Amino acid sequence: MNKRISNAVGLVLGVVTLVSLVIPLASLAQFTGPPAQLPPTTQVTFSTVSNALCTLVAWIFTILIILTVIFILWAAYLYLTADGEEEKIKRANHQLLYAAICLVVAIPSRGIPYFVATFLNASTFQGC
């Protein structure tokens, strides 16, 4: 019975993940406007690099927070279905450890652009 529930939850999570990855691609495929033109070439300045870094860090932060929530929910599921089995409780504890590691990596990642700006002595850095 537990294996059926586990398989069903795995199937649902797989379908949700697949759908969440395919829907944005399908919406991009419907673009019928004029063909895209390349932007004019510009010089690379500190502000363009810092903006790119801020965007990258924001994406990484968002992904890590989503992973943290998923790890916590999966650990809760493992605790609820453990039935006192030591192996399942151990797996749930490891999932909570992974969630804590995700959070520990995610929170300081927001400070990376400020650290880089300080290291490069950039007085024009406006922040993210």
Image: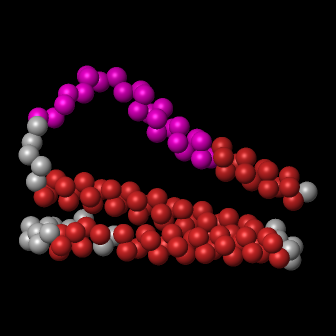
Colour setup of the view = secondary structure
Q: Residue at 19% across / 31% down in the picture?
A: 38
Q: Which residue appears farthest toward the right when viewing the image?
A: 1
Q: Is residue 116 magenta?
A: no
Residue 101 at x, y percent in the picture: 52, 73
Residue at point 48% right, 32% down? 26
Residue 25 coordinates in the image, percent (x, y): 46, 35
**Residue 32 shown in magenta:** yes
Q: Quadrant of residue 3?
A: bottom right
Q: Which residues are magenta?
A: 16-40
- Taking the image as shown, residue 84 lies to the left or right of residue 32, namely right
Q: Is residue 122 left or right of residue 6?
A: left
User: 28 or 98, which lies in front?
Assistant: 98
Quarter of the image with the N terminus is bottom right
Q: Is residue 59 above or below residue 40?
A: below
Q: How many marks?
A: 0
Please determine whether, in this image, residue 44 is positioned above or below residue 75. Answer: above
Q: Is residue 76 something that shows in the picture?
A: no
Residue 22: image location, x then y, percent: 53, 37
Can residue 42 be seen? yes
Image quadrant where residue 112 sits = bottom left
Q: In the picture shown, does residue 59 fall above or below 38?
A: below
Q: Residue at x 59, y 47 (%)?
A: 17
Pick out the residue farthest to the front. 119
Question: In which quadrant will I find the C terminus?
Answer: bottom left
In this rendering, position of residue 83 left or right of residue 52: right
The reply, left or right, for residue 35 in relation to residue 23 is left
Instruction: Identify the residue at horizontal 11%, vertical 37% (top origin).
Output: 41
